[in-house]
Amino acid sequence: MLITLCYLYLWARWGRRPAALVRTTVRRLRASRCSFTFCGAAAQPSGARVCLSRGGRVFCVGEGQFIDDLNKWALFLVSPFILEAEHIAFVTESIWVRGESLQRPPSSAETVVKWSDCCLPLACRPGEPYRLIAEASVDDFSKLGVAFMEDRLQMDNGLVPQKIVSVHLKDSTLEELKDQALNNQTPIPQPNPEPSPETEPAQGVMEHVGKSDSKDPGEGSSTPRRGSAPGSEPASEGSEQGGGSPEHHHLHLSSCHECLELEGSTIELIKFASAENIPDLPYDHSSNVQGTADESYPEREERRVNVTGKAPNILLYLGSDSQEALGRLQQVRSVLADCVDTDSYTLYHLLEESARRDPWPDNCLLLVLATQEAIPKDLHQKFMAYLSQGGKILGLSSPFTFGGFQVTSKDALQKTVQSLVFSKADGREVRLRALSSGCVYEDSTGERLSPGRLQGRLEGADQDRMIVQVPFGTCGGEAVLCQVHLELPPSSSLVQTQEDFNLLKSSNMSRYEVLREILTTLGLSCDVKQVPALTPAYLLPTTREIRAPLMKWLERHMDPEGVIKSSKLSLKFVSSYTSDMEITPSSIPVVTDMEAFSSENFDFEIYRQNLQTRQLGKTILFAEVTPTTMSLLDGLMFEMPPEMGLIAIAVRQTQGKGRGRNAWLSPAGCALSTLLVSIPLRSPLGQRIPFVQHLMSLAVVEAVRAIPEYQDINLRVKWPNDIYYSDLMKIGGVLVNSTLVGETFYILIGCGFNVTNSNPTICINDLVAEYNRQHKADLKPLRADCLIARATTALERLIDTFQDEGPDGVLPLYYKYWVHSGQQVRLGGAEGPEVSIVGLDDCGFLQVHRQDGDVVTVHPDGNSFDMLRNLIVPKHP
């Protein structure tokens, strides 16, 4: 009776406004322990009272439904779950729909509502129907229900919702959730559509043609493919956790609800192949040694994390290597750098030869095609294979197309400024003036584009399509293709008149708005951060004994104005810094008065207490923000006496360098340093200089795992110069520059590893936090200053051991921590013979065991995406 009266009252008050009716009903009756159900009219629960009926679907209120047994459910959470007081737990039942039904547009003209945007998934139960338990606020639960009633609720992975019902979780269930979250983090299971080979492609989705093209470039590796069904992942090999159990538990970040923004796609094993890009990682936690973070550390900023498993690379393909293409490269690079968070992504030029040869698809978050040249057939097939694996493509005035779309030339539009209407994913429109490429898109199928997708058309009678969003395959691949020059500034040489320049200039902000909408739709973060201003450096000797001879040495080597110059920059030594002093990438002031030094990011005393060396790291050149720590030491490395133990440390780098032409991401939270080491030529290590990078990588791992109670933090070395979490994700890297002068190698060892920065991958403190959850431990977060000092100490000991005992003195420890034991690789390419890695040779190169029984040394072929791809056997004269 109460329910009926409430219904009559609400109906009288709210009339035919379903959203208000649903929300108010839920708010007023949720305390009565009833259950709210949204379903088809035929599936109405027995005894439930209908509050709203629409299009064959009903919203009704009935007896409360309870869940008290989670044995058949797979838990998503990694931290103890507490249902918030104002939140509702509910179950969504869905079915898998194939073919045309998968892409059917919503019947309502209103905005599509994504299920995953409105709730936090808690557990799932695969089967038919596929069930998901989630929690949401009253408003979001009501929003989901109304969207379901109006047939505009969108699930993920081809699921179609059939029923939503609120449930009550008993206290015993909540306790079970807590226990599971603490003890057994389970990867998110997926519904298994089990499509047959004869299944027709979904509407708007083009299946990849050609069996050979659909092959995974990483075939043979243990990394599961995107979209693989539950249980298809290989068992973890050599796992050290869980007492050697073959079950593989995925690492979840401490802010795992961000991972769930993947909208239900599988949290798969993440394997970076890039040897150069130091990713931004998680947070700051310390140990019981000196250098643990104190309780006053600020809360970590919540940000979206890259959980696709791809290295944070945006690859720019501009066709042939002409001067015109190089000029276009700078324009494309510049506009993208203005749109995306350059702390999280690195932009690379993908050369035509490299596009054919190198394993770039494994390391590419976004492929940008910015050439008006025809795409060669073999590259078109490779780009389609990339899409079929879930890749994302942005076409900028490129002839590349697929999925029924054709590019048609219209001479009247060539190099003209046109009025463009761009529709965002939420249906809002942006109107702007844009430079036309002279081409438009035509759909050979004659079908209208689905609601909720990006699209751009010209104003006018023809309504020419200039921007289209096209999905591909079943793994989430998609492309946004444009025939307006979003990449070109108003000052481009293609802009012909002053009037056109003025029109484009007035629309420049809208051009960036459109670009950011496209990039965000393709999965990138466009939270642009301002490049930090450069800061002065500080000269910090760690002992009093060093300070006096150091200052005398400076007096002898400075010019009358206090400057020491090198080919890369000038260091001007001053007693104090004032704001009127100029700081540029080529001229940096260095403050010599230690009393003036203070930093929130670097604790000098913690560094001193953790540095236990005779020589290395004794004199610090510290800067909050500097172009690169390598450059800071360039003018000092050959002159300063070795006993000074020079090391450059920075919080941020604005021009960090990797191997070859690669960039090195240097966000706040990384431990960034360059250490000066001198090695006699006629010494065991001097005869095997490639081992230096191996020793530095090993020193970083030892800096963490040699701390009492931290020995099981799964930090490892990856040949030749990377630090990894297990064999899954890169956490740091090493760059070595050596110069032989007379009988001495002067070596600059650049090292960066993520300590407190979570994005875009993972950091050491995330590993510590995960270990604490898994083992109910209380390890403290670590600090960058502490670990730089410990790594420097470990390196000096490793060098001493190598000089006394040669490679045999350090290789047992190196093999203990490396990721390659028994690893299978292929020589020469994806179709080359398979070999097993067995160790390092006397010079530090990989040795592999061939199928014919021979053990041979192999070298990388020079590609910068994965040093373990396309290994070659060097030819000896």
Image (spheres, grey):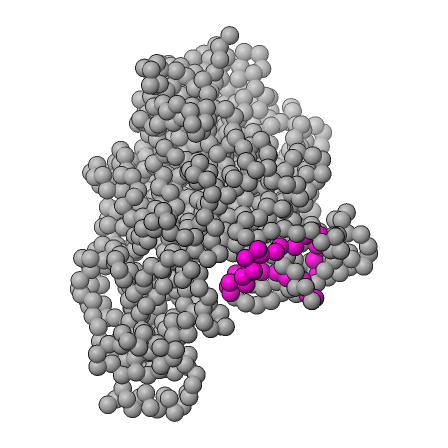
State whether residue 16 appears in this view. yes
Q: Residue, x 36% and y 88% (percent of image)?
A: 10
- Most distant residue in the top direction: 877
The residue nearer to you, when weighing 790 against 300, is 300
Q: Is residue 93 above or below residue 826?
A: below
Q: Is residue 855 left or right of residue 628?
A: left
Q: Is residue 170 left or right of residue 101?
A: left
The residue nearer to you, when weighing 460 against 618, is 460
Total numbered badges shown on the rendered structure: 0
Q: Is residue 593 above or below residue 660?
A: below
Q: Position of residue 374 (x, y in %)?
A: 64, 41
Q: Which residues are magenta?
A: 432-460
Q: Residue, x 44% and y 64% (percent of image)?
A: 104
Q: Residue, x 74% and y 52% (percent of image)?
A: 411
Q: Is residue 252 left or right of residue 634?
A: left
Q: Position of residue 658 (x, y in %)?
A: 53, 33
The residue nearer to you, when weighing 76 against 764, is 76
Q: Position of residue 575 (x, y in %)?
A: 62, 38
Q: Is residue 244 above or below residue 801?
A: below
Q: Is residue 837 left or right of residue 367?
A: left
Picture quarter containing residue 217? top left
Q: Residue, x 75% and y 60% (percent of image)?
A: 503
The residue nearer to you, when weighing 94 against 362, is 94
State whether residue 583 appears in this view. no
Q: Quadrant of the N terminus?
A: bottom left
Q: Position of residue 190 (x, y in %)?
A: 32, 53
- The answer to whether residue 606 is magenta is no
- The answer to whether residue 442 is magenta is yes
